[in-house]
């Protein structure tokens, strides 16, 4: 693949990307009767160290990630009594997450995905486990907790990059197996988004915040243990390749891609699913477990959205789904203003469902339009998501720092979210015309 300075071919960039398609992996063509049969596909039918440990480790890691999205903001609020500090600390972790994705690419190339994924997941367990142990001992301080959150954010980015190379290592050139693994992977992620916060809320009620905070590092430790059974492949050359690839500059020269990236930025409000429920539950409802229940509803709405996303995209098209996501964003901004649990719960469900449908549809449209060249665009999309998540978290910190009350902060956020929704609606109209 060309680098940042890769030059497009003589034909137009749009024509080149539309012409690109997936190349049939070697050995998968019916005209090659001597090729070995691909490994049987299924949760329990891949070779030892294949799909089963990947999905098992992913489930454990997702339980930990979604649990900490509830427990970490609550712990920061409890220790510091500062909403702006909480938002700044989680925003700093998001920034280091983005840095970690770049470092993870080099580490994975040098040491292999299994080693890097296992080691980075162990670092996540160690950093948050140290904070949880100090919390249970009653000696945890704000600087130590913030440091643990930042270290975890960096390790998370490294782990994400290493994890992204595992499916192609498992599939070994079988395109059907690769799609099957990704389908199961996304279902596992959404399931973790439901169960993780649910377990945290239960632990808060049954044993208190200290033990609830210990759930995430325990889950990461289990994930690292499972990841040890992954295959040791370090390369992803078995994956589909385009006959012609453009560099990042070539991709950014395509107007549709630029609009799609802008839509991605406007859709990146889901980092609020850990932060806003924590602030709302702690400061408005004065009921910390409510943060877990609201986070669970984010997962329920997202699971429902992922289930109907493909059918909705084929039936309605991308533009209307982006418009629905814009409406869902407005509803989310307004849902907190009554200061009651039920309106917030309804708003969270409607937002998360519409947002996930639009995000899946946008990714599907990118893959459909650009075939095997889509990994370049998806790389740009991931960078956009990370950058947008930082902006979102910093905006939350600013909203609560500059307002005199909790509900004043939520009102300011509602206005900002409405502006973002208007931008998403505009981009959706432009994309539907192209």
Image (spheres, grey):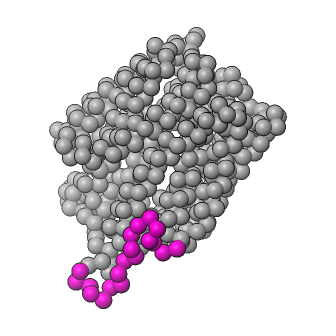
In terms of image quadrants, where is residue 210?
Answer: top right
Residue 205 falls in which quadrant of the image?
A: top right
Camera-side residue of 215 and 408: 215
Residue at 63% across, 52% down: 220
Helix, strand or loop for the magenta stretch, by majority: loop
Image side of residue 160 versus residue 32, left or right: right
Query: Could you tell me residue 18's position as x and y percent?
Result: 21, 57
Where residue 42 appears, as percent x and y from the top left, is: 41, 67
Image quarter of residue 134 = top right
Identify the residue shown where x is 55% and y is 42%. Answer: 196
Q: Residue at x 24, y 42 (%)?
A: 312
Residue drawn 49% across the image and 59% down it: 55
Residue at the extreme left: 433
Q: Is residue 40 magenta?
A: yes
Whether residue 237 is visible to the viewer of this picture, yes or no, is no
Q: Residue 150 placed where, x, y %? A: 65, 42
> Does the segment drawn in magenta span residue 210?
no
Name the outermost residue toward the bottom: 34
Position of the N terminus, as image quadrant, is bottom left
Q: Which residues are magenta?
A: 30-48
For the residue pair 160 and 395, the one nearer the viewer reads as 160
Give the quarter of the figure containing the C terminus: top left
Is 21 placed above or below 36 here? Answer: above
Residue 389 coordinates in the image, percent (x, y): 49, 37
């Amino acid at each position: 693949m060309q680098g940042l300075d890769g030059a497009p071919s003589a034909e137009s960039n749009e024509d080149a990307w539309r012409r690109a398609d997936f190349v049939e992996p070697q050995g998968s063509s019916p005209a090659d009767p001597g090729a070995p049969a691909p490994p049987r596909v299924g949760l329990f039918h891949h070779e030892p160290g294949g799909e089963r440990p990947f999905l098992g480790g992913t489930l454990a890691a997702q339980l930990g990630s979604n649990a900490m999205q509830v427990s970490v903001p609550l712990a920061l609020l409890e220790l510091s009594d500062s909403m702006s500090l909480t938002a700044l600390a989680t925003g700093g972790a998001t920034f280091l997450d983005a840095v970690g994705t770049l470092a993870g690419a080099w580490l994975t190339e040098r040491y292999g995905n299994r080693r890097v994924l296992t080691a980075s997941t162990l670092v996540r367990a160690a950093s948050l486990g140290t904070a949880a142990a100090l919390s249970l001992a009653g000696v945890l301080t704000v600087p130590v907790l913030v440091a643990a959150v930042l270290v975890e954010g960096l390790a998370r980015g490294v782990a994400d990059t290493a994890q992204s190379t595992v499916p192609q290592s498992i599939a070994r050139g079988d395109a059907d197996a690769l799609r099957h693994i990704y389908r199961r992977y996304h279902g596992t992620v959404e399931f973790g988004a439901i169960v993780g916060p649910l377990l945290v809320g239960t632990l808060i009620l049954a044993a208190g915040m200290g033990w609830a905070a210990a759930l995430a590092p325990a889950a990461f430790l289990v994930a690292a243990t499972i990841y040890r059974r992954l295959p040791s492949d370090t390369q992803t050359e078995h994956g589909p390749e385009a006959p012609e690839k453009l560099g990042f500059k070539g991709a950014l020269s395509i107007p549709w891609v630029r609009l799609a990236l802008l839509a991605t930025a406007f859709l990146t409000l889901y980092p609020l699913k850990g932060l806003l429920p924590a602030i709302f539950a702690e400061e408005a409802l004065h009921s910390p477990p409510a943060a877990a229940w609201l986070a669970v509803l984010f997962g329920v709405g997202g699971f429902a959205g992922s289930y109907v996303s493909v059918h909705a995209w084929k039936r309605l098209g991308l533009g209307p789904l982006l418009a629905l996501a814009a409406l869902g964003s407005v509803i989310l901004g307004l849902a907190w203003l009554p200061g009651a649990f039920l309106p917030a719960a309804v708003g969270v469900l409607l937002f998360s469902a519409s947002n996930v449908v639009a995000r899946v549809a946008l990714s599907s449209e990118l893959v459909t339009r650009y075939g095997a060249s889509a990994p370049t665009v998806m790389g740009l999309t991931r960078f956009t998501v990370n950058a947008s998540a930082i902006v979102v978290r910093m905006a939350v910190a600013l909203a609560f720092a500059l307002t005199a009350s909790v509900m004043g902060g939520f009102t300011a956020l509602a206005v900002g979210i409405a502006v973002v929704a208007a931008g998403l609606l505009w981009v959706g109209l432009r994309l539907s015309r192209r």
